[in-house]
Image (spheres, rainbow, N blue to C red):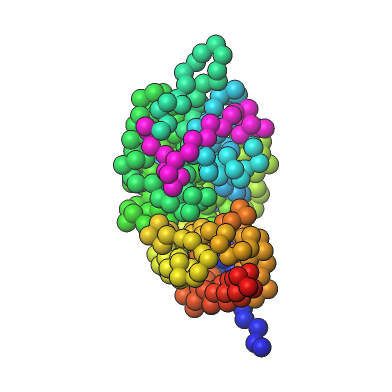
Amino acid sequence: MPMHKIIDLRSDTVTRPTPAMRQAMANAEVGDDVYREDPTVNRLQERAAEIFEREDALFVPSGTMGNQAAIKVHTDPGQEVICEARAHIYNAEMATMAAFSGCLARPIEAPDGILSWDRIAPWVRARTDNRSRTGLISLENTANLAGGSVYPAKVMEEICDQAHAAGLPVHLDGARIFNAAVALNSSVADLTQGFDSIMFCFSKSLGAPIGSMLVGSRKFIEEARSIRKMLGGGMRQAGVLAAAALVALEESPKRLHVDHENARFLAEGLAEIPGLKIDPAKIVSNILFFDVSETGMTSYDLSRRLAAQNVLANGVTPKNIRMVTHCDVDREDCARALEVMAEVVGVVRKAYSA
């Protein structure tokens, strides 16, 4: 039996640098970025600020560092950070807002991970003598753990306007904000104009090997630069990384619609496999979650069976699997993944029902 290539649908973080990225890395002009002397990093930061129509930007090693630096700048110890219950900053960043910024998350559940001001408003707290007050509101677009759902522009605009009227800053975890922009046929600048700070990732859907970016006012970025150093994120000749990120920033958004189409293709195929539950109409970006509880297996068992046939996917709860499409997975790979899934589920369901 011929061995098939590995089809890695665990995340869009698993991509390899493109030939153009590797060439740019090899040719990168570099300097010491802690001294602000790396010309490639400087060019990347200037270009990011230009695209988002902001005053300044700061290159950081990871999205987690970018988010946590923003939280530290915007808040004081003892305050609360309002976020959706499935937010990355709450679920997947090692409680750093508590450990580093001394802040408590105030998670709020919302349908499809999309908060509204009506849901946020009851939890906004001013200074009192016995309860922590709100220091920051953080949104995530696209909402990773909610299946890659996308905030409507007007919803974000209302939250930002109302928060500012209440004297609160708003941060955007925009790890995949370019996916949201493609899904809404908008620009990232238009979508994010109301936020006080934005973090976005090069190493996820844009396909670069490493790095994220904070954008905001010049004052905010100056503060964030100090926080980056506290977190160990001051890099030296980082131009070799920034060079790949520059290629990703300029070229990758043009093809994100392909990943979205492939995710919908996967969802439609999965919906036809008995034992799997997913609503393809809810797949609007490159992330999908589906329920495997009726197969007779846990998601972890099913993931192991898929991996044995070179299809990689993550079980995220006992009954749910996440798949993420990206530039290293094409339509043929998606079709192969569906074939393997149907085979594995069919064999196990037959044995289970017997």
Q: Which residues are magenta?
A: 97-118
Residue drawn at x 42%, y 59% as measured from the top left: 279
Task: Tell whether 11 sits left or right of 256.
Answer: right
Tell whether position 110 is magenta: yes
User: Which of the two residues, 12 or 212, is positioned nearer the viewer here?
Assistant: 12
Q: Is residue 225 visible?
A: no
| Residue 268, percent from left and from top | 42, 68
Residue drawn at x 40%, y 27% as measured from the top left: 121
| Residue 210, percent from left and from top | 60, 56
Task: Tell whether 285 sits left or right of 320.
Answer: left
| Residue 149, percent from left and from top | 43, 51
Tell whether position 43 is magenta: no
Numbered disc total: 0
**Extreme bottom residue here?**
1
Residue drawn at x 64%, y 37% as measured from the top left: 95
Residue drawn at x 35%, y 25% as measured from the top left: 165
The image quarter in which residue 304 lies: bottom right
Name the quadrant of the N terminus.
Answer: bottom right
Name the quadrant of the C terminus.
Answer: bottom right
**Extreme top residue here?**
129
Above or below residue 14? Residue 174 is above
Q: Is residue 84 visible?
A: yes
Above or below residue 64? Residue 164 is above
User: Which of the two residues, 252 or 264, is positioned nearer the viewer here?
Assistant: 264
Above or below residue 72? Residue 178 is below
